[in-house]
Image (cartoon, rainbow, N blue to C red):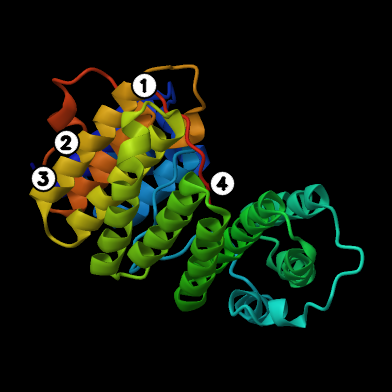
């Protein structure tokens, strides 16, 4: 099948699944309805991955963008990007002094949650300012904490803080600094002894590597996280199963971009199986394993790998996967 026709078929399928008319989808994409009609019929040439990313974002199921494609949304100012790079370097932690009255962990956790809200809203200047104050406070609190559990909690908050920094930097295309922040998040999660938080940090790192076009490193990072999650997933832990599914989707797109369609399809099969294992349609649809999300990844893999088949065709014989619940950083 012609690639443009396959792309149009995939988009039309997802539009109808969401109960949208062509005019409604056109409004979401800021395009005229006639343009959507022509795309769905394969009559005009468009950049496949850029369009899929735009449709996925409009439908609330974002894909990792292709590194060669245009980035959507406002780009951080030079000053904001520079401030975030400073945070990612870990230099601000070195400003920490001895804490006579360390801030309560609950207050520090609330600030980390605020950091994620700022990252999601793309308020990068405010995010950098918050993290520039939060990370030294966390380091001071760690210096004053002697109880193992207290230290673990503080490391968890530090991991979440660096995750927010990494996600923001990745949005602006600052991949090297984003990679450094994600690596710091992974180290903090490991020090906290939190297996799932470490795996979520590894997922974030793999996603950044994928965006940067470092496919071999992205696959290796995702593969290691997958291996760590195998046992808790086998024990039936829903968060581990969800995270395995998300990693499988990421590995599928990595394999497709790396020119390995069989490996991509194998990972899509894993994602479908993880969705079936979760099985509860009442779980949050933003988890990343909903039928819509998997179908969009199928379309992305099909087009990226040049398979020339309609999205979802490979999985039509399988039961429809249920939405998944997953503990991951918020969508970026």
The residues tagged by marks 1 and 2 sit, at their Cα atoms, a distance apart of 21 Å
* Quarter of the figure with residue 97: bottom right
Label 4 element class: loop
The residues tagged by marks 4 and 2 sit, at their Cα atoms, a distance apart of 29 Å
Which circle's residue, 3 or 4, is located before the other in the chain? Answer: 3
Lateral position of residue 216 relative to residue 243, left or right? left
Residue position marked by numbered label 3 in the rendering: 308
Which circle's residue, 3 or 1, is located before the other in the chain? Answer: 3
Of residues 312 and 219, the one drawn nearer to the viewer in this rendering: 219
From this view, report whether residue 303 is shown above or below residue 325: below
Label 1 element class: loop
Label 3 element class: loop
The residue lying at 42 percent from left, 17 percent from top is 280
The residue lying at 21 percent from left, 48 percent from top is 301
The residues tagged by marks 3 and 4 sit, at their Cα atoms, a distance apart of 32 Å
Pair 3/4: label in front: 4
The residue lying at 23 percent from left, 17 percent from top is 319
From this view, report whether residue 323 is shown above or below residue 153: above
From this view, report whether residue 324 is shown above or below residue 265: above
Of residues 272 and 154, the one drawn nearer to the viewer in this rendering: 154
Residue 322 badge:
1
Can residue 48 be seen here? The reply is no
Can residue 168 be seen here? The reply is yes
x, y percent for residue 178 = 50, 70
Residue 330 badge:
4
Lateral position of residue 123 relative to residue 296, left or right? right
Residue 310 badge:
2
Label 2: few (<14), some or many (≥20) within 10 Å? many
x, y percent for residue 61 = 44, 39
């Amino acid at each position: 099948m012609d690639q443009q026709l396959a792309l149009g078929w995939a988009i039309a399928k997802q539009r109808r699944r969401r109960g949208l008319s062509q005019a409604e989808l056109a409004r979401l994409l800021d395009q005229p309805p006639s343009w959507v009609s022509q795309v769905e019929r394969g009559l005009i040439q468009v950049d496949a991955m850029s369009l899929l990313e735009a449709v996925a974002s409009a439908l609330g199921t974002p894909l990792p963008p292709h590194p060669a494609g245009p980035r959507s949304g406002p780009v951080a100012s030079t000053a904001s990007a520079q401030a975030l790079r400073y945070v990612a370097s870990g230099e601000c932690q070195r400003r920490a002094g001895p804490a006579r009255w360390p801030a309560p962990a609950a207050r520090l956790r609330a600030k980390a949650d605020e950091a994620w809200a700022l990252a999601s809203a793309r308020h990068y200047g405010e995010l950098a300012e918050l993290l520039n104050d939060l990370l030294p406070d966390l380091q001071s609190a760690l210096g004053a904490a002697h109880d193992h559990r207290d230290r673990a909690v503080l490391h968890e908050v530090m991991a979440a803080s660096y995750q927010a920094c990494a996600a923001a930097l990745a949005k602006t295309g600052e991949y090297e600094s984003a990679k450094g922040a994600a690596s710091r998040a992974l180290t903090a999660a490991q020090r906290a002894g939190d297996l799932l938080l470490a795996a979520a940090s590894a997922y974030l790192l793999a996603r950044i590597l994928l965006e940067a076009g470092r496919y071999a490193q992205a696959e290796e990072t995702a593969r290691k996280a997958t291996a760590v999650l195998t046992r808790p997933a086998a024990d039936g832990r829903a968060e581990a199963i969800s995270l395995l599914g998300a990693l499988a989707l990421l590995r599928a797109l990595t394999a497709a971009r790396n020119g390995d369609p069989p490996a991509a399809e194998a990972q899509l099969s894993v994602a479908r199986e993880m969705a079936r294992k979760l099985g509860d349609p009442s779980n949050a649809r933003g988890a990343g394993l909903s039928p819509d999300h998997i179908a969009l990844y199928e379309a992305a893999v099909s087009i990226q790998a040049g398979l020339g088949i309609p999205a979802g065709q490979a999985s039509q014989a399988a039961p429809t996967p249920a939405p998944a619940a997953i503990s991951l950083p918020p969508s970026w």
